[in-house]
Image: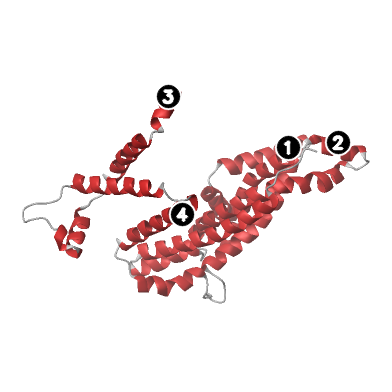
Amino acid sequence: MIRLFEALAQPRLLRGLLFLLSVAVLAGFDYGGLVARLAAVVPALALPAGQAAGPWLVIAVLAALVVLNFWLLSHLPFRAQATIIWVELLALFAAFCWSFGLSYSFMLDRAPILLGLELRDGFIQGAALTLFICAVSIAISTVIALAAALARLSDSGPAFGIATFYTSFFRGTPLLLQTMLIYLGLPQLGLVIDAIPAGIIALSLCYGAYMAEIFRAGILAVPRGQSEAALSLGLKPAEVTWLVVLPQAMRLIIPPTGNQFIAMLKDSSLVSVMGVWEIMFLARTHGRAEFKYMEMLIVAALIYWAMSAVFELVQARIEKRFGKGVSAR
């Protein structure tokens, strides 16, 4: 087995495997239009009449360029490699979008609406509404998660049963189903909830169940000896929890909570099925009105990506500040 891994680690073999993998991936695309466009730009690439470049020739050339690209990158410093890969992937994404023949003027005209820079009947919409829903939901889900985690760690049978049932149900069913049960099911019991509050409740309950496990793991990671020492000093169990255990557990809880907020930012698009004027609802509405779905979906994707990137930077700073672990001493 060790010899097999050593053989696979040989540079020539790695380049050969990369070439074969590139061929396998590239074989799924149609290159007739690409060859025609290149021939129109560079006439020297045009073949004589009656001849055509076989698709496998184009695939082989592109696969060879992929291998050459990675070989050249291997001679550069780490940061330069990562930067160049980012630039290349962004260029591929731009080429992918360009292949649709998009109306960029339409995208620029509708972008402020999706960003929420314009009010609708005096109310926020688009990205601004998405951020509002996520901010309220993450605050509520944090309180729910803490209560559920403490209930799971308590000696009370009813509290443990309620907490485990809650986390099992909301982790075991889709968020879209939960949203529909709250928005469409509760009115049958006489409790009518508007779309935005229903979306906030669904997101809070769903992510509260996931975050409850994060809180529980963070609390259990605090050495038991610290609780015993605090009790020996005369502190009550509740005081030990709030003054000794939770402040230390937060160093482990806060960083993964950032992951949950970023995930919630994207899952909030599900509330669009209830008619909430957030990013996805606006993208579908304006795309359907002008039959320009792809333009609006790409604008929505870029907005979600930009917001996630900003919060990833914030999360990185939070992890640097809090994610240092808990000392056992």
CA gap between label 2 and label 1 equals: 23 Å
Secondary structure, mark 1, is helix
- What residue does disc 2 label? 228
CA neighbours of label 4 inside 10 A, class few (<14), some (14 to 19), many (20+): few
**Circle 3: residue type:** Arg
Q: Give the total number of marks visible in the rendering.
A: 4
User: Looking at the image, is mark 2 or mark 4 nearer the viewer?
Assistant: 4
Residue nearest the observer in this picture, 287 or 234: 234
Residue at the (39%, 29%) spot, across then down:
7
In the rendering, at what x and y percent does residue 224 appear?
A: 80, 35
CA gap between label 1 and label 4 equals: 52 Å
In the rendering, at what x and y percent does residue 110 appear?
A: 43, 72
**Picture quarter with the N terminus:** top left
Residue nearest the observer in this picture, 197 or 63: 63
In the rendering, at what x and y percent does residue 165 appear?
A: 66, 39
CA gap between label 3 and label 2 equals: 51 Å
**Circle 4: residue type:** Ala
**Circle 2: residue type:** Glu
